[in-house]
Image (cartoon, rainbow, N blue to C red):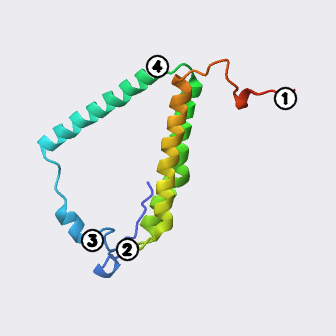
Amino acid sequence: GDHVEVEMEDTSSSDVQEPLLPESYYSSYEPLEESRLDCLDVRHVGLTLGITSLALILAMVAPNISVVFGLLGGTTSSVIGFILPGMVGIKVVPNAQWKPKLLIVIGVVIGIVTTAVTVYSTFVPTSGGTHNPCNATSN
């Protein structure tokens, strides 16, 4: 058969690349202890059961899907629109002034108010005898 020769490159010490992480990172790494792994497993199972139970209770209590969408929209819109940008602003600018912090405060207030309005409008029935400007028709 055919004989193919492969030429190998000479790898001297000057061609060796530096490691991606500093040496101190590798020397300080210690694997988790067995008892700590058990604790993490118990916490993971507990959180999973808690979140699943909360979702089940919400599904049983919520009269329709619009309530769930209202709760999700009220909380996630404030987190995405105000809280996360404020947190990024604080992280990116080390000496953050008051503007990013104000964004976070506004986001928390909006999240609480919109969630409270959704819960209130879900569980407090509106009486038919009062004037509701949202349902008003023009004469």
Q: What secondary structure is found at the residue carrying circle 4?
A: helix
Q: Judge from the rendering whether residue 134 lies leftward or rightward of residue 34; answer left or right.
A: right
Kindly give the residue lying farthest to the right in the view shown. Answer: 139
Q: Are marks 2 and 3 in contact (CB under 8 Å)?
A: no
Q: Which of 14/84 is in front?
A: 84
User: Dot 3: what SS?
Assistant: loop
The disc labelled 3 sits on which kind of residue?
Answer: Pro
Q: Nearer the viewer, residue 80 or 11?
A: 80
Between disc 2 and disc 1, the foreground one is: 1
> Residue 84, relative to residue 74: is it above or below?
below
Number of other residues with Cα within 10 Å of mark 3, as a class: few under 14, some 14 to 19, many 20 or more? few
Q: Are marks 4 and 2 in contact (CB under 8 Å)?
A: no
Quick one: label 4 or label 2, which is nearer the N terminus? 2
- In this rendering, position of residue 112 left or right of residue 134: left
Q: Dot 4, crowdedness within 10 Å: few (<14), some or many (≥20)?
A: few
Q: Earlier in the sequence, mark 3 or mark 1?
A: 3
**Does label 2 or label 3 sit earlier along the sequence?**
2
Three-letter amino acid code at disc 1? Ser
The residue carrying mark 2 is: 9
Report which residue position mark 1 lands on: 138
- What whole-number distance in Å separates the C-alpha atoms at marks 4 and 2? 70 Å
Determine whether the residue tagged by mark 2 lies in a helix, strand or loop.
loop
Nearer to us: label 4 or label 3: 4
